[in-house]
Amino acid sequence: MTFEEFKTIVTAEFPGITELQLERFRALDVLYREWNAKINVISRKDMDGIYDHHVLHSLCISSYWKRMSCPTEGVKVLDLGTGGGFPGIPLAILHPECSFTLCDSIGKKVKVAAEVAEALGLENVLTVNARAESLQENFDYVVSRAVTSLDNFYPWVKGKFSGSIFYLKGGDINEEISVLMEKQGLKKGSISTWRIDSWLYDDYFKEKFVIQIGNN
């Protein structure tokens, strides 16, 4: 996907997007190519897919927030297992009204996220090289992109958020959700799923979901 194709999609979905935000999205291609040559955070074979496979995929959380009328003003968001900054960096570009903490236990990946955020002038981003268990702060939302299975992920952030987890995951998610609910004793109705291909009609997004897990 080219930047112009990406721009057409995001301006249609988020009509209030500004020229500054679009320029920041445009800059991601060069920034990640430069950093990826030093520290591999995106498969080098997939760099040409940065706008659809990484940036647009991250913004599916924003599209879900919009559809569900999730509040964002003043919201504190933890991106756990951010790697080189996904989904946190694209979300931070689109949502200057939110504050984002991008956390990963691998220092060199956090360095990429930090450098990209600084180059873009994102004042609403803080990067942290730490394990989830060591975080003392409480957040409104937690976001993540398929870091591990849901039943592994949930205990890392349990007690650290007051709103919801928004998790990007693909494939057969039903069994994974059932295991999570059983292990954590989550109430029926506390988990919602949204098919991304109901918005993005592309084979890449087939069987990919935003999973919302409420604070039980």
Image: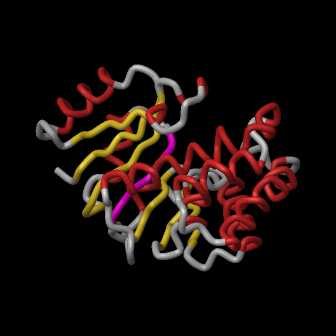
Relative placement, left or right, of 15 versus 143 is right
Name the foreground residue: 58 vs 42.
Answer: 58
Tell me which segment is drawn in magenta. Answer: 140-145
Assess whether residue 141 is covered by the magenta stretch: yes
Image check: 132 left or right of 186? Answer: right
Q: Position of residue 48 (x, y in %)?
A: 80, 38
Colour treatment of the image: secondary structure
Query: In the image, 39: left or right of 159?
Result: right
**What residue is rendered at 65% in x and 59% in y?**
110
Q: Nearer the viewer, residue 203 or 105?
A: 203
Image coordinates of residue 101 in percent, x first then y, are: 50, 67
* 76, above or below 66, in the image: below
Relative image position of residue 137 (x, y in whole percent) = 37, 71
Dominant SS in magenta: strand
Residue for point 54% across, 51% down = 59
Residue 189 location in percent, x, y?
15, 39
Q: Please state, as top left, top right, bottom left or bottom right, where the N terminus lies in the image.
A: top right
In the rendered view, tell whether residue 184 sits above or below residue 111.
above
Total tally of numbered discs in the picture: 0
Q: Nearer the viewer, residue 17 or 136?
A: 17
Residue nearest the viewer, comparing 80 with 123: 123
Query: Which residue sits at x=20%, y=33%?
Result: 181
- Identify the residue shown where x is 80% and y is 53%: 29
Relative height, residue 208 to residue 145 (above, below): above
Is 117 inside the magenta-drawn segment? no
Classify residue 127 by image quadrant.
bottom right
